[in-house]
């Protein structure tokens, strides 16, 4: 398609007498001629520079931090003594992996309470059965007129009282059993307390293994074997680092240009030449009185875990200026062509004549790019068709060089 366009453009510069092998266009001082017919055939389009608010570059320091929603803080559920710890800071763990084991004092007490309630239940069941038999016997005697109705009612009441005691005992057992579940015991382990009484008195019965609630990296470890700890003491912290926060210090003077959703580019000394990209998800409403900065948050995917907690970073943010008196010229990106390593545009001089103009580019904003040097007023620039003009321009350069 491009070759056809170049050939068609070349044809527009020939006279009938010219031979096909000879140069087909006239190029003087970077000018090139293209007939109106060929321009229409290839859909040439032009546009004048627009005036836009300038894009400014904000550069700020930042630090890599964990996402608090992806950090699990681990503490014992009850008071106890640490027996062993299985992990160190920096270790990677999977969900449900063992973290530490401790002698759970409350678990030991709960096991004793559970066994005690089971023993009381057996006694209550025996009493209830005894009073049920006494009541049934009283009914038979009453039918034979051997006892008064009042005696039957007394024995019925005794039975109902014992029946209520049994129901109350079941409720107490359920409450203790729920506590055992919270301490990490399984249904099978709890059942073993009732079916195998000798096993329930093992020294290790009250030991609790605390497991990882999430997969991640150990970022904190406290406590050592033999230490007595409780729910108020955090022993471990696990961070899921598949996504991290970049906390950016935005100076007060730049806050007006920083918005949620703005794209940023992040660079780190550890990875020279590599850029990490994200968008601002939050800008703090609080200003640090000492540094006169506000925190902005950027969420960065980190599947390869290149970003380490505590790393320092440089964040670059392109923000649209707010000074309407300092407007700059901007043109569509489609108008820019690289010629001899220099950004260039083709300016339309008249209906069929175009001239190459070298320009200096500024920041890009959407599909527009700022022009800092090279344009004069409201010149018309070729947008659609600029690549074809570039091809013909280079072809004419080569032809002129060979002819010379």
Image: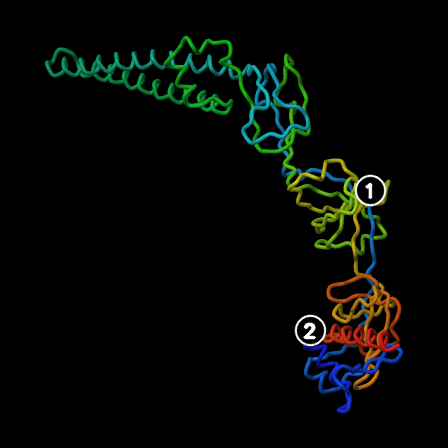
Q: Which mark is residue 288?
A: 1
The residue under the point 69% across, 73% down is 2
Instruction: Determine whether the residue tagged by mark 1 lies in a helix, strand or loop.
Output: loop
Q: Residues within 10 Å of mark 2 (few under 14, many from 20)?
A: few
Q: Residue at x 57, y 31 (%)?
A: 94
Identify which residue, 261 or 174, lies in the foreground.
Answer: 261
- Please say if 375 is above or below 301: below
Q: Give me the residue at 10% from left, 14% from top.
A: 144
Is residue 210 rendered to the left or right of residue 354?
A: left
- Closer to us: mark 1 or mark 2? 2
Q: Quadrant of the N terminus?
A: bottom right
* Quadrant of the image occupied by residue 402: bottom right
For marks 1 and 2 on the same chain, the one whose residue lies earlier in the sequence? 2
111 and 22: which one is in front? 22
Q: Quadrant of the C terminus?
A: bottom right
Q: Residues within 10 Å of mark 1 (few under 14, many from 20)?
A: few
**Element marked by disc 2:** helix
Residue 135: x percent and y percent? 21, 15
Asked if residue 322 shows in the view, the reply is no
Return the mark for residue 2: 2
Residue 74, by quadrant, is top right
Against 176, is 67 above or below?
A: below
Instruction: Give above or below for 242 relative to 369.
Output: above
> Toward the viewer: 233 or 152?
233
Left or right: where does residue 171 sit relative to residue 54?
left
Q: Position of residue 373 (x, y in %)?
A: 89, 68
Q: How many marks are shown on the rendered structure?
A: 2
Residue sitting farthest toward the left: 144
């Amino acid at each position: 398609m491009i070759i056809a366009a170049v050939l068609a453009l070349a044809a527009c510069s020939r006279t009938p007498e010219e031979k096909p092998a000879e140069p087909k266009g006239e190029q003087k001082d970077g000018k090139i001629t293209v007939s109106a017919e060929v321009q229409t055939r290839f859909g040439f389009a032009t546009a004048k520079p627009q005036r836009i608010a300038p894009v400014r570059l904000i550069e700020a320091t930042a630090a890599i931090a964990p996402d608090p929603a992806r950090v699990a803080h681990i503490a014992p559920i009850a008071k106890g003594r640490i027996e062993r710890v299985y992990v160190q800071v920096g270790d990677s763990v999977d969900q449900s992996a063992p973290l530490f084991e401790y002698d759970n004092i409350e678990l030991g007490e709960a096991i004793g309470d559970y066994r005690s309630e089971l023993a009381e239940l057996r006694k209550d069941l025996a009493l209830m059965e005894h009073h049920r038999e006494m009541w049934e016997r009283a009914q038979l005697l009453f039918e034979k007129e051997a006892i008064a109705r009042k005696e039957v009612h007394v024995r019925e009441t005794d039975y109902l009282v014992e029946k209520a005691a049994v129901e109350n005992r079941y409720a107490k057992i359920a409450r203790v059993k729920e506590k055992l579940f919270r301490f990490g015991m399984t249904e099978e382990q709890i059942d073993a307390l009732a079916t195998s009484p000798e096993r329930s008195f093992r020294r290790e019965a009250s030991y609790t293994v605390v497991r990882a609630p999430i997969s991640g990296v150990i970022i904190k470890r406290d406590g050592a074997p033999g230490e007595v700890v409780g729910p108020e003491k955090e022993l471990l912290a696990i961070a899921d680092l598949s996504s991290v926060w970049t906390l950016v210090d935005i100076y007060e003077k730049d806050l007006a240009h920083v918005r949620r959703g703005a794209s940023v580019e992040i660079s780190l000394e550890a990875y020279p030449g590599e850029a990490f990209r994200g968008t601002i998800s939050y800008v703090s409403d609080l200003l640090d009185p000492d540094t006169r900065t506000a925190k902005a948050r950027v969420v960065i995917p980190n599947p390869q875990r290149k970003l380490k907690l505590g790393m320092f970073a440089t964040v670059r943010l392109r923000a649209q200026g707010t000074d309407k008196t300092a407007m700059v010229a901007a043109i569509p990106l489609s108008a820019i062509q690289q010629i001899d390593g220099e950004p260039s545009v083709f300016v339309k001089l008249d209906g069929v004549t175009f001239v190459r103009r070298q320009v200096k580019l500024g920041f890009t904003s959407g599909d527009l790019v700022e022009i800092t040097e090279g344009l004069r007023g409201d010149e018309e620039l070729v947008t659609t068709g600029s690549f074809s003009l570039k091809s013909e321009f280079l072809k004419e350069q080569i032809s002129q060089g060979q002819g010379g």
